[in-house]
Image (spheres, rainbow, N blue to C red):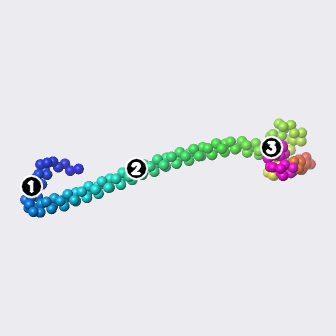
Amino acid sequence: MFDIGFLELLLIGVVGLLVLGPERLPKAARTLGLWIGKIKRTVSGMQREVSAQLEAEELRQKLNEQQKKLDESLNQARRGVEGVAEPTRSSAASPSSKLPAEGDPASSPGEGERREGSSPLERLDDALARKGGHAGGAEDAPAAPQDSATSRAKDSSAP
């Protein structure tokens, strides 16, 4: 810290001996040593605290970076799931696109347009009826064909 050599210490000791005298010099040297020790301990404690704070800040930055990476990967996964779900939603929303391909004799382009305008419950019933009605369970299976037959009768009776 201070650049004090042997000659400077010897000069300070001689001046101290002349100023304080031989009786008070040992006591003053002891007191000076205690104060220097306290100062060194205080400085080293401060250095430890500063280094601990720096390490804690580095850890916070690393945690923030990891949190951002996790958020980005979560958002990517969410977009992927939504991307997979979108084609399913669009195909479920327009059941008339599957009807001519399946060869249903009751379907026609005019009827498909009416189904899109019908309620979501009727479209769901139609979809369940085409798939065999086994998506809802034992009590839902008989009800689905009756509802879809009713909706088909309504569609065919319309002018």
Q: Using the image, tell me which numbered label, if any, was put on residue 95.
A: 3
Question: Which residue is labeled 2 in the image?
Answer: 55
Q: Which residues are magenta?
A: 129-144
Label 2 neighbour load within 10 Å: few <14, some 14-19, many 20+: few
Question: Which residue is labeled 1 in the image?
Answer: 14
Q: Amino acid at mark 3?
A: Pro
Q: Using the image, tell me which numbered label, if any, was put on residue 128.
A: none
User: Cα distance, mark 2 to mark 3?
Assistant: 60 Å
List x then y, in percent, for residue 157: 92, 48
Q: Amino acid at mark 1?
A: Val
Instruction: Confirm or deny contact between disc 1 and disc 3 (CB under 8 A).
Output: no
Label 1 neighbour load within 10 Å: few <14, some 14-19, many 20+: few
Q: Earlier in the sequence, mark 1 or mark 3?
A: 1
Depth check: 156 or 77 in front?
77
List x then y, in percent, for residue 48: 34, 53
**Circle 3: element type:** helix
Q: Nearer the viewer, mark 2 or mark 3?
A: 2
